[in-house]
Image: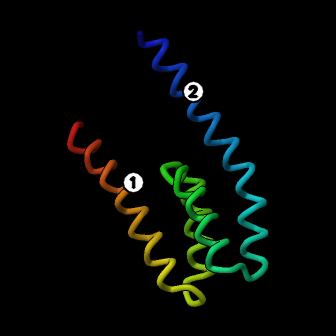
């Protein structure tokens, strides 16, 4: 059972690494130009799914900082979405320990 858990954890880590490699160039692209609010929203939706990973969270924050003044309502929504989705989970894990 412990070996299966280890394998699943390793697969998740590999998936996050692959996502980081893919999203890194996409974040650079999105931050190097001005995108529409719809494009930004779709992009942040995808990044949010992986924002539990520290490296991808940094990318997420980078995009949010880049567009904070251009689309403040959109960025506020995605900051709150991150908190709802990931910060509450961290608190639950801390309470379980």
At x 55% / y 69%, what residue is drawn?
Answer: 61
At x 58% / y 35%, what residue is drawn?
Answer: 13
Residue toward you, 45 or 6? 45
Characterize the local packing of mark 1: few (<14), some (14-19) or many (20 or more) Cα atoms within 10 angstroms. Answer: some
Q: Examine the image and state in which quarter residue 37 appears.
A: bottom right
Residue 91 position within the rendered picture, expressed as x and y whole percent measured from the top left = 27, 50
- Residue bearing the label numbered 1: 86
Q: Whole-Å distance between the Cαs marked 2 and 1?
A: 20 Å
**19 shown above or below 64:** above
| Comes first in the chain, label 2 or label 1 | 2
**Mark 1 element type:** helix
At x 41% / y 64%, what residue is drawn?
Answer: 81
Residue 58 position within the rendered picture, expressed as x and y whole percent measured from the top left = 58, 62
**6 shown above or below 92:** above
**Mark 2 element type:** helix
Q: Are marks 2 and 1 in contact (CB under 8 Å)?
A: no
Residue 35 position within the rendered picture, expressed as x and y whole percent measured from the top left = 72, 79
**58 shown above or below 50:** below
Q: Examine the image and state in which quarter residue 95 appears.
A: top left
Quadrant where the C terminus is found in the figure = top left
Q: Residue furthest left?
A: 95
Q: Which mark is residue 24?
A: none
On screen, residue 29 versus residue 66, left or right, reads right
Q: Which mark is residue 10?
A: 2
Residue toward you, 87 or 34? 34
């Amino acid at each position: 059972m412990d070996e299966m858990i280890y394998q699943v954890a390793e697969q998740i880590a590999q998936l996050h690494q692959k996502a980081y490699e893919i999203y890194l160039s996409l974040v650079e692209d999105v931050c190097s130009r001005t995108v529409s609010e719809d494009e930004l929203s779709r992009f942040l939706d995808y990044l949010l799914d992986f924002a539990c990973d520290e490296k991808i969270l940094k990318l997420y924050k980078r995009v949010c900082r880049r567009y904070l003044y251009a689309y403040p309502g959109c960025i506020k929504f995605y900051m709150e979405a991150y908190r709802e989705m990931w910060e509450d989970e961290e608190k639950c894990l801390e309470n379980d320990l």
